[in-house]
Structure formats: C-alpha cells, structure tokens
Image: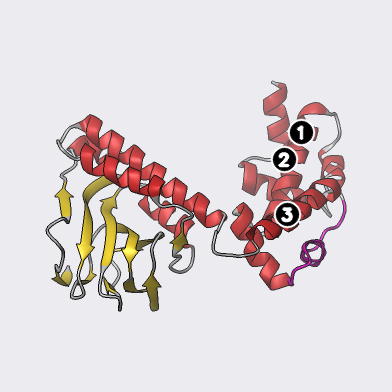
Amino acid sequence: MNVVFNLDISEKSFFVIHTPCVDSKQLPFHVLSCGHFLAGPDYFTTREGMDNYLLVLTLSGEGYLEYADMQVTLKPNQVFLINCSLKHSYRTGSCGSWEIEWVHFNGNACHEYYKLINEEELNIINLADSKCISKYFEEISQTMSGNYLHNDVKLSMLMTNILTELYMSKLNPIDNVRHSELNEMLDNVISFVQENYQKKITINDMAQIAHLSKYYFLRVFKGYTGLSPYEYLINYRINRSKLMLKETCLTVEAVAYNTGFNNTNNYIRHFKKIVGTTPLKYRNYWIT
C-alpha cells in the first residue's frame, strides 16, 4: 500500500480503530476504523492499494477529492464512497476548514453496494439532512468499544442501514429544483406503462408522456426507479404474466401475447433471465 498524509486536525477530532472477530469475517460488512475530524488547511491524504472501502460525510467547510479521473469539490451534507485499492486523494478545500465523519470498512457485500451507489463512475450523494447518517456514525463509534461478535453483528447492521439510506437518497436526488415536478412526470409514465403494457410501447412513447428529451428521460427514470425504462417495462410484463400463469389456463403462447411480448421465444428468454426458470416450470411449481 502507498500512502502519504498530513493529519492537520484539531484536538476535538477523534478516531477509533477496530479489529473484527474472526467469525465476523463472513458478515456483509465489518468496520475497521471510523472518526470525526475537524481538519485544518494542511490536511490531506493520498493513497493506493488499501484493501477496504471509505465512506466520508462532509458536515461543514469544504473538501476536495480526486478519484477515478474525477476532481470533485465536497460541500456540507455530501457523501462519497470510494474503493481504497484505487488511487485517490482528498484534502481540505479552499475555505481552509473541513469537518468530516468517516468510516473504513470491508466485507462480502461491499462491492455490490459500491456498484449500486456509484454505478460506472463516482457519485456524490446530496443529503437533505445529514442528521440520520451522522447518528449512524455515532452509533458505530460507540459500538467499536470491544471485540465481541455481537458488536460486529451490530456494526454490520449499521453499515447496511447507512448504505441503504444513501442508495435511497441517490434514487431521490434533492439537488434538482424540478424534483417534485419530475416525480409527477415519471409517475405518469409508470401509470401509462401499467395501463398499456399489453401494447407496443417504445422509449420515445414514454419520453413524450414525461415531456422530456429521450436522453434526459433515460437518466432521470433510472434514478427514480433503479431500472431503465425498458427494464421496468419488461419486469412489469413478467410480473403480470406470472399472475396469468398462476390464475388462468392460458397457454404460454397466449400469456406471452397478452402481456405484450412480440413472440413466445422472446417471452421465455426474458422470463428465464428474470425469474430463473421457464414459464411452464413456474406454472407447474405453483400448481403442485
């Protein structure tokens, strides 16, 4: 591991280091260290090759982060999650002070949550209020007082809560002045899909319902639902087809036609990909 740092922090700052129990290594998350820093103008860290993840919440002041070919200024109520094995650098911003809460952690579920929050590039999450996340940080530091398995289980739960809150905040961004209006537009699209799923529906149709350009619609719809418009449409059709398979005697071909699929093979392919089995096996499972 390569690391260079200058710990320019006030006496009110603190950090706690924790060694998880051996049995806790199979938990979704295990916490390694956490802290609350009131950093001065000369605070910085540059590192690469550290086998864990870092979550940082800015409480006040300003920070600056370089990560994955991106340079980001960090403001209060903003959170970032990075993989410390990749080269990164963060420091106090131009205002000369930066108050942060942070946690280093690892575990079996880290990579999946990292992908959910960041997707293909670093995603800075804006919080309407950081009190909830800050409360979790406080609980984490208090729970790290002893190397007991029940403490590690609680720490894993707290990390799950934090990362889930951040993912939900990502799906409902607060930094868009049109947030409420956009939600209403996207709800209209969802209602349109649910009422017309048996018909041919295109991305252009959905974008027109939302009164948005196609490419902007694609981005905000995924941010709102967690799925692309096409994925949402296919998933909704599959869910409707599952009801038909369980509650009617329609053939698989008829079910495909009645849920908007253009041919049976296409329907079976999507069904197997999403459900993990074929429509016929799914039906037989529920009948028996």
Count of numbered badges drawn on the protein: 3
Residue 261, placed above or below residue 83:
above
Give the mark nearer the N terminus: 3 vs 2: 3
Classed neighbour count for the residue bearing mark 1: other residues with Cα under 10 Å, few (<14), some (14–19), many (≥20): few
Q: Amino acid at mark 3?
A: Glu
Residue shown at 61% from the left, 42% from the top: 276
Alpha carbon separation for disc pair 2 and 1: 7 Å
Secondary element under disc 3, as helix, strand or loop, is: helix
Residue 75 occupies which quadrant of the picture?
A: bottom left
Classed neighbour count for the residue bearing mark 2: other residues with Cα under 10 Å, few (<14), some (14–19), many (≥20): some
**The disc label shown at residue 71, or none:** none
Q: Which residue is mark 2?
A: 239
Secondary element under disc 2, as helix, strand or loop, is: helix
In front of the other: 4 or 91: 91
Q: Are marks 2 and 1 in contact (CB under 8 Å)?
A: yes
Q: Which residue is mark 3?
A: 184
Of circles 3 and 2, the one toward us is 3
Question: Is 196 one of the magenta-colored residues?
Answer: no
Residue shown at 28% from the left, 60% from the top: 100
* Camera sees residue 73: yes
Residue 283, placed above or below residue 69:
above
Q: Is residue 159 left or right of residue 178?
A: left
Residue shown at 16% from the left, 49% from the top: 16
Give the mark nearer the N terminus: 1 vs 3: 3
Question: Is 200 one of the magenta-colored residues?
Answer: yes
Classed neighbour count for the residue bearing mark 3: other residues with Cα under 10 Å, few (<14), some (14–19), many (≥20): few
Part of the protein shown in magenta: 199-213
Q: Which residue is mark 1?
A: 243
Q: Are marks 3 and 2 in contact (CB under 8 Å)?
A: no
Of circles 1 and 3, the one toward us is 3
